[in-house]
Every structure is written in structure tokens, then in C-alpha cells.
Amino acid sequence: MNRQEVKEKYKWKIEDIYSSDKEWEKDFALAEKSLDFSEFAGKLSNAETLLKFLRKDEEFSKLADRLGVYAHMRKDEDAANAKYAAYYAKIAALYSKYATEAAFVEPELAACDESYLKNIIADKRFSDFDYALKRILAGKPHVLSEAEERLIGMAGEIFENFYDIFGYIDNLDLPFPEIEWEGEKVKLTHGLYGIILHSDNREKRKEAYEKYYAAYEGLINTITSVYGGNVKKDVFLSKAYKYNSCLERALFAEDVDKKVYDNLLKAVNENLPAMHRYIADRKKFLKLDKQYFYDMYAPLVNGVELKLGYDEAYAYVVKGLAALGGDYQKLLQRGYDERWIDVEETDGKRNGAYSTGCHGVHPFVLLNYKPTISEVFTIAHEMGHSLHTYFSQKNQPYAKSQYKIFVAEVASTVNEVLLLKYMLANARDNEMRKYLLNYYLDSIRATLHRQTMFAEFEYEAHSLAEKGEPLTKELLCNLYAGIGKKYYGEEIEHDYHISCEWARIPHFYRAFYVYKYATGITAAINIAKRILTEGEKAVKDYFKFLSGGASTDPVSLLKLAGIDLSTTEPFKVAMREFEETLTEFENLMGI
């Protein structure tokens, strides 16, 4: 479908950011002209000068964000549009120049006396920036000399190379062969592999699985070298910045206590018997003598669907999230009425879905809607992101409005859980109920169990590297296989292919990122449970969290919603949720 064929009501109203490209170009010229902070360099130890800098930096950043969001949204409407590709490239260059211009700020502030930093943090004029300044104060022990910082800054592009190289391997160079699918010979791709794995054709699943992993195994030495180099880079930077470990450095960047990471791994490990039970149930229900990993996504419940057009689906989501109260539902309706959402799949449009936005304008959502159950959940998920952004920007100054990645998936997943609970309560028959329970089990397995397994692997890999152990392909494959056997149990065959799975995970090139998915769904399950049992009080507490932005550390923000991840209780609640869902599913399936 051509974009011009799409009805106006199904296109996002991007004019709410800029009414025309001429307005964008005018602001871009203004941003370029204002990008000069040289007058402040070497003078930030004066409170008045620092305040002037922070205000100027804030105004520039607001403008750059607005320009950037417009450019990437326009580009995502149609990748073939050269004009907006050029806009996006110009913004990328502007951000790069900004990074160079502002490179002096953090080292200079960190070099200031502790008493000076404490005084400006206590000064009400700096209240918009107090959390950011507290983080600079806390990071003083990890700041290097100006010369050392410059050297590491010069090596920044080299450090990023590992991620880029793996991206080229994963997206361009893997020797994926052809496979016959739906009567045609087509090249196996990441997307097609996922589709085949979710099909009920076991022979085809096996063929795709073996061919897919053979491509990675053919390049395993190269991938081992790239991943090993990436881990060495992490080790180097953690030592250079005087952290005790790579994990400590990663957690400091998010302002997260190590207790949270430890609680996650401990809780999941202690509750693996329920996971093993689910794996055994799958084997039994699929009537398999031997179960392989290519069977893990085979459908257990067929023929269930909720085919809703977009308008019906959106109305269903609004109704399904009634537990969050009338004000939340009105905001959801505003998003629909005021065209926050780009709905239709069109030629050249970016695939998938996301939420985005800039300060001073409502958030936006990109969809490629199809009438399936999973797409109904996608609406709820992305609007969860958007309303989190809406509340944070409405209630926080710009400097505190952008919440950390640690909590980024909480609101979206709360919406998914609440919608699922609504659908279960209104399921028309047992087949729909079975489907939804299985959907929930697989969501928890993929987001909580699997991501924690990934987190445990990268923790062990980094620990070995920190001890000077060479990360060979044998070591990494054996390490991954051992952790996999612990997580999945004995009712599935642990072949060589799956021991190489670590080699295809892009997130491993952003160390200690994956655990945030697991803590996110843990927090969401707990929040949804509170809302459904305690009602209005829990909703009010949840809105405090949504409104918190980055006003304090993310674990403290979640405490506003009644969830304390520094204790073991939320993790136990999430584990019980999985086990209780599994018991209900088993009863319905007659297992």
C-alpha cells in the first residue's frame, strides 16, 4: 500500500511537532548557530556560570530532541525518501558535534570540590538538575584526568566496532541457505526462521533450526573473536575507571544496587522446577519421544484468533485497561482521537512498532497493524510506553523527564498483563482461555527466565575474563550449554546447536542490558497484581511512578508504586505467578 492511500485518521499528526519542513529547517539552522559552549569551558566551578551553562544546554537539547524526533519519524514513514534520510544524517552529525562541544562538562564538574557540588545540589536554583549533579558527585572516584579522558574518548569509535562488526555478520554476512517454505524456494532469514519455528510443521522446524545454526557455527571462530574482544573492552574500561568489575560499572551507570541483580538470579534459580515442569508439559502435550529446541515455539493451542480491525482493537484495549481508571482511559482515547498513532503498513515504512516523543509535544506510536491477538497486545504495549512518557514529561522538568532504560519496559508490560487478565476474565470459551494462559507462560518464560539465563551467561563470561581466562569457543559453548541445561532441565535435548546460541544474541554487545527485561516484567507483574487487588490506592501509587521520570534512581521510583526490587519478595511474586498460571493451564489441558 502506498502512504498516499492511507486515510488521514490512521496517520500520526506529525505536524504537531513541526507544521512544515521549512519550520524544521529554520530550527535546525538555529540549533547549529547556538551550538557553542566554549564560553563556559574552565569556568564551571562558578555557580552562576554553571547555572547559565545548564540552562543553555537544556534549551539546545530540547531543540535537538525535537529536530531529531521529527527527522527519524519522517524517515521511518518511507526509508526511500532521500530528503528525510538527509535530515536524519544532519541530526546525527549535530549530535556528534554536540558531544564534542560538551565533552569538557563532566570531567570539569567531577574535578570540582565535593563541598562545591554539595552546595549547588542544595541550592534551589539547581533543583531541576540536582539528580544529575548527584550522579556526578557519586561518580567522582571514577573520573580520570583530562588527558586520560581524552585518550579514552579518542578510542570511542574503536570500542563501538565490536557491536558494529557483529551487526555486519548478523545482518549481512551469515551464509543463510535457501529453504522451501509454502511452496517456494526462499532464502532463510531471521524473520522467516521465527515464523517457521512457530509453525506446527515439525520437519520444517528441524530443517530451519539446523540450517540457521549451521550458518553461525560456520563463523563461530570469527564471532568468538569479536565477542571476546567486546568483553575485553568491558574489562579494560571497568579497570580504567576504577570499578571492581564490569557488572559494577554497568549497574552504576543505571544507578541500580547490585542486590537487584543478585535477587533476580537467586529467585529464578530457586524456582527453576516450575520451568522444568512447563518444558515437560510441552513434551507430553506434543506427544514427543524426544523434545528439541526447535519444538519450543510450536503452538500448543491452534485455531484461536481475535481478528479485530484497528478501530475495534483500540477500543478493546481502552476497555481492557479500565483497571487503571477513567483518567488513563481518557488519555488513551486522546491518543486515538488526536492521531498520535501511525497505523498502516505501507511501502518503505519501518517495520515493527515503537513509541517516541519529545518534550513539549504529546508522544507518538508507530504500528504496522494486522488483525491478530498479538497486535492487540502491541497497541497496549506501545501506548504504555507513550503514557509513561506523557506523565513523566508533564510532571518533570526537561532535565528529569527522560526515565532510565531500567524502567522503560515496566509501563508497557503492566498494560499487557492487565489486558491479558481482562481477556482471561472475558474469554468466550476454554480454547481462548488455554491460548491466553499459554501466551502468558511463554511471555514470562521468554522475558523473565530466558533473559535471566542470558544475564547469568554474560556475568560468568565477564568474570572469567576478569580473571584472565581466554574466552575460547569451547569455553563459551560449554559455559552456555551448562547454564542452558540448568534452566531447561532434562525433558529437552541439549544438542551442540543450542550450545552455540550465545553467538547470535546482539544484546551481548551491550553488556548487562538483558537483565532489565527480566526486572521489568517482574515489576510489571507485581504492579498489575496490586492494581487488581487493591484498586484505586495502587493506581495512585502507580501514577506516582509514571510521573517520576528520572527524578531519582529507578529502584526508588518503583518503590513509589509499592515494588521494592532490593528485596526478594517481588521476584517471589513473579515466580508464583508463573507457577499458578502453569497449574491452571495444566488443568485446562488435561495434563
Image: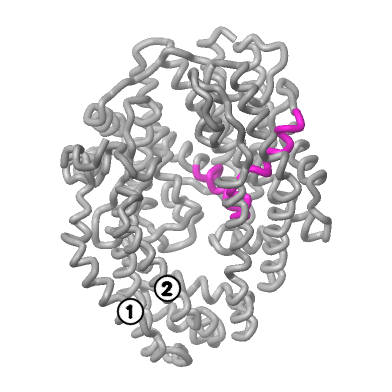
Q: Is residue 583 above or below residue 262?
A: above
- What x and y, as percent, mark residue 50? 40, 85
Inspect the magenta stretch and tell me whether residue 335 lies in it. no
Q: Residue at x 50, y 27 (%)?
A: 195
Q: Secondary structure at mark 1?
A: helix
Taking depth in this image into account, of 140 and 145 the one nearest to the observer is: 145
Horizontal side of residue 340 vs 253, given as left or right: left
Q: Is residue 71 visible?
A: yes
Sequence order check, earlier mark of 2 and 1 = 1
Task: Give the amino acid at mark 2.
Answer: Asp
Q: Is residue 182 above or below residue 227?
A: above
Taking depth in this image into account, of 226 and 275 the one nearest to the observer is: 226
Q: Residue 256, labelled with which disc?
A: none
Residue denoted by label 1: 55
Q: Is residue 546 above or below residue 183?
A: below
Q: Quadrant of the C terminus?
A: top right
- What x and y, as percent, mark residue 64? 33, 69
Q: Main secondary structure of the magenta part?
A: helix
- What x and y, as percent, mark residue 450? 61, 37
Q: Specify start and end residues of the magenta stretch as a single range.
A: 495-520
The answer to whether the residue labelled 2 contacts the one labelled 1, judged by CB atoms less than 8 Å apart, is no
Q: Residue at x 58, y 76 (%)?
A: 153
Q: Secondary structure at mark 2?
A: helix
Residue denoted by label 2: 130
Taking depth in this image into account, of 382 and 52 the one nearest to the observer is: 382
| Other-residue count near label 2 (Cα within 10 Å), few / some / many at <14 / 14–19 / ≥20 | many
Quadrant hosting residue 20:
bottom left
